[in-house]
Image: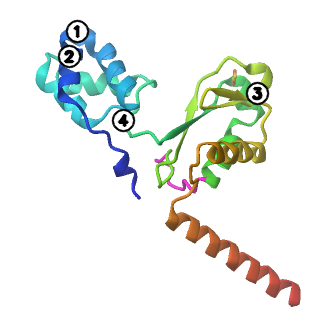
Amino acid sequence: MSNQSLEATVDPELVNKWIDEIGSGVPAAVPLLQAIQGEYGYLPRDAMDMVIANSDINASQLFGVATFYAQFRMKPVGRHLVKVCHGTACHVTGADRLNTSLRHILDITDEEEDTSANGSYTVEDVACVGCCSIAPALVIGDEIIGNLTGADAQRVLKKHARGVKEELLGDEAAKKKKEKEAAKATASGEESRA
Ligand code: FES
């Protein structure tokens, strides 16, 4: 399954309603983008095109605003979001380790990607979530969880996946992982016999 299937279907009436209510000039760009992202979780290209076609905001103005602010994302988001805090306290206590560990278990190997291939989870870097005393921390669902090692982060993710009945890996990735583990087991067996 490709992340393409996470692309939202945009409702033109809704986009036009936001333009009517919020405004059609450049100052409305940020609140319009916030409304779109609030509805779809990211900024679908179709919604952006509708704003450009039906307002006084041109493409370079709208995309300029969308790419300037870190709050906006241009890519679809997975069915569940894990926010890894990268504020100063979390950064110095191992936020990168959490991130690497989560990406590893979700088999997200492409640096440009932050969502698992089966669309289950997106791992996003965020600024301080306000719980520095339990750094490093992450947010999953409504819960902030802290004092985590990389292994803890994987445990937290697995527990969440069990709770929401979500597969961490798609079929292909799970098969690839099993093959890798089997090859590793064979290699270490041969080594110990040598
Ligand atoms: S820096 Fe992570 S909670 Fe504040």
Left or right of 36 in this view: 102? right
Picture coordinates of residue 78 (x, y %)?
47, 42
Q: CA distance from mark 2 to mark 3?
A: 42 Å
Q: Are marks 1 and 4 in contact (CB under 8 Å)?
A: no
Look at the numbered disc 1 and say if its residue's Cβ is closer than 8 Å to ligand 1.
no
Q: Are marks 2 and 4 in contact (CB under 8 Å)?
A: no
Q: Which residue is mark 1?
A: 21
Q: Are marks 2 and 1 in contact (CB under 8 Å)?
A: yes
Q: Amino acid at mark 3?
A: Ala
Q: Which residue is mark 3?
A: 135
In the structure shown, which secondary structural element does the residue marked by tag 1 occupy?
A: helix
Q: CA distance from mark 2 to mark 1?
A: 6 Å
Q: Nearer the viewer, mark 2 or mark 3?
A: 2
Report the magenta residues as a range.
106-113
Q: Amino acid at mark 2?
A: Lys
The image quadrant that residue 93 belongs to is: top right
Q: Residue at x 12, y 21 (%)?
A: 54
Q: CA distance from mark 3 to mark 4?
A: 28 Å
Q: CA distance from mark 1 to mark 4?
A: 23 Å
Residue 117 seen in the figure: yes
Q: Which residue is mark 4?
A: 74
In the structure shown, which secondary structural element does the residue marked by tag 3 occupy?
A: loop
Picture coordinates of residue 127 (x, y %)?
59, 24
Residue 23 seen in the figure: no
**Who is closer to the viewer here, 126 or 166?**
166
Q: Residues within 10 Å of mark 1 (few under 14, many from 20)?
A: few
Q: Are marks 2 and 3 in contact (CB under 8 Å)?
A: no
Q: Which residue is mark 2?
A: 17
